[in-house]
Amino acid sequence: MDTDLITLIAAIAATIISLGALVHLVGMVQRWPRAPGEVTDNIAEWAHSDSGKSAVYFAKIAFTDATGQSFTVKGDIGRRKPWPIGEKVTVRYKAANPNHATSMNFWQRLLFAGVFGFFAVMLWLAWGGVIG
């Protein structure tokens, strides 16, 4: 397959991912309510890598929605050390289904969209012959 064609396909894919993430972020900010949450436990999962396997911890987060109903969800950010029990976090949740919630904040999601946006720009420039 031609290198220019591969670059074009990668540029299109990165653009779609970046724009999709940005549209999703804007929709969440506009429509998903926020609620204070608290880390109540840790959920350990195994991550495999070249150096073996190690635990990745996800927070178990309790929050109360606008109707006063309590929910517990798995946080969507994993890390190598356990989350402090009792840590306060902000949760955004889908009003129609509060079990669909996220603890990932605005800046983390914007960074995700921005990284793919940056790669998309670089790929478009490479495809156009400006760089590379």
Image: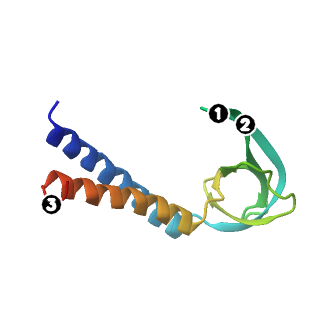
Q: Position of residue 109 (x, y in %)?
A: 51, 61
Q: Which residue is mark 3?
A: 130
Residue at image coords 57%, 63%: 32
8 and 98: which is toward the camera: 8
Q: Three-letter amino acid code at disc 3?
A: Val
Q: Are marks 1 and 2 in contact (CB under 8 Å)?
A: yes
Q: Position of residue 94 (x, y in %)?
A: 60, 56
Q: Dividing the image into 4 quarters, which one contains the C terminus?
A: bottom left
Nearer mark to the viewer, of 1 and 3: 1
Q: Three-letter amino acid code at disc 2?
A: Ser
Q: Which residue is mark 1?
A: 51
For mark 2, does the 10 Å Cα neighbourhood hold few (<14), some (14 to 19), or many (20 or more) residues?
few
96 and 128: which is toward the camera: 128
Res. 54 mark: 2
Residue 72 relative to residue 8: left or right: right
Distance, label 1 to label 3, CA atoms, is 39 Å
**Callout 1: SS:** loop
Q: Three-letter amino acid code at disc 1?
A: Ser
Compare marks 1 and 3 and give the one earlier in the sequence: 1
Here the colouring is: rainbow
Q: Position of residue 55 (x, y in %)?
A: 74, 39
